[in-house]
Image (spheres, rainbow, N blue to C red):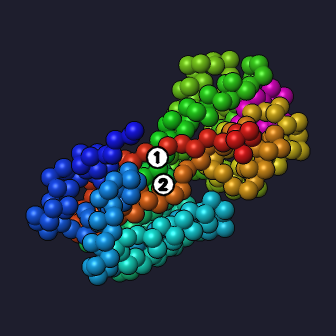
Amino acid sequence: MARRPGMAALAAAAGVSVATVDRLLNGREQVSQATRTAVLEAALRLGHPAAARLTGDMAAKPATMVRFGVLLHKQGQEFYQNLAREMRGAVAQLPGVRGQLEIDFAASQAPSEVASLLRGMAGRCDVIAATAVNHPEITAAVEGLKAQGIAVFSLLSDFAQGVRAGYVGLNNLKVGRTAAWIISLSAKGSGKVALFVGGARWHGHDLRETGFRAYLREERPDLEVLESIVNLETRQLTYETTLNLLNRHDDLRGIFVAGGGMEGAIAALQQARRPGEVALVVNELTAESRAGLAQGWVTLVDATPLPDLCREVLALMLRAAGQGGIGGAGQVFLPIELHVAESL
């Protein structure tokens, strides 16, 4: 019979000290609402008996008002639509919190636009999470928000290291190595491999490229990784470039689309190759990547567990909001979801 998790396990899962949990459960001293919420969420995840008690305590108290700001990219892309929907649902389910969620979308990767949108959230939000490129202009915007007591967390791809309150997403170095691993297993003989990145300043894509190249250099030196291609995460540019690569290189063995735009790579392969002839690894599970897996055009999809992402970042945001914008979460790495045709 499995043992119930103790106070130490609950404290570790909540990111607080055992003494803090003891004070909370035994009512010895006042504990902040953010800490109370973090411990409750940890208790719910662990199935700890304290969850029922804490839920009752929170129900008896007036809900805390927190204004959450989330800045995302590409409003028309299915992945970001899914992320926005998950975030809305997660905020609505926060125990003891009356959350107000403001979601803005950047139309481009331009640092000036993203920095302006971040600054514009200052009067509407108590704490912010965002997807953004790593650029000095964005770092300056985050510094300005921090000076106002507003913590900013980076999502999916890190930025403003040393200034932002924390990062929540995948370990992108491992994502790149995993993509290279499956291509090394799937590639039929020696040849060339193509790599698409979303832009020059996506920190996560830089790490994915580093891991991807390092693995193939170590394990499959017979596979030549071509110069990385910036596709701006667009379908059309990825389609045209992939078709050109396929026409120029009869020995193209694999393609890794490290960010968005994978729909274009799938369409080009459908036009110029047979299923499975070129190994294709793409990012995030959507209707198109799922269909690509089922039909044999996609070899592997690496994906972010969106419910975990929302739960983790909201817990951190709650804590930062309760501490006047003070963050210190460092990096929170989520498990990589790997999908192949047979796992659908």
CB of mark 2 within 8 Å of CB of mark 1?
A: yes
Residue 136: image location, x then y, percent: 39, 56
Give the camera-side residue of 79 and 189.
79
- Residue 31 badge: none
Q: Quadrant of the C terminus?
A: top right
Of the pair 66 and 193, the residue shown nearer to us: 66
Find the magenta span and give its range.
244-255
Q: Earlier in the sequence, mark 2 or mark 1?
A: 2
User: Within 10 Å of the Cα at label 2, are there few (<14), some (14-19), or many (20+) other Cα atoms?
Assistant: some
Residue type at tag 1: Leu
Where on the picture, by quarter, is residue 244? top right
Left or right, residue 239 beside residue 184:
right
Percent coordinates x, y for residue 185 in the rendering: 69, 24
Which part of the image, by quadrant, shows the N terminus?
Answer: top left
At label 1, counting other C-alpha atoms closer than 10 Å, the crowd grade (few under 14, some 14-19, many 20 or more) is some
Q: Residue at x 38, y 51 (%)?
A: 46
Q: CA distance from mark 2 to mark 1?
A: 7 Å
Residue 320 versus residue 204 in the image, above or below: below
- In the rendered image, which residue does mark 1 sit on? 334
Pick out the residue farthest to the left.
28
Viewed as shown, does residue 285 lie left or right of 111?
Answer: right
Give the residue at x 31% y 71%.
56
- The x and y percentages for residue 292 are 78, 46
Q: Residue at x 34, y 74 (%)?
A: 96
Q: How many marks?
A: 2
Query: Mark 2 falls on what kind of element?
Result: helix
**Residue hosting label 2:** 308
Residue 196 visible at all: no
* Residue 156 showing in the rendered view: yes
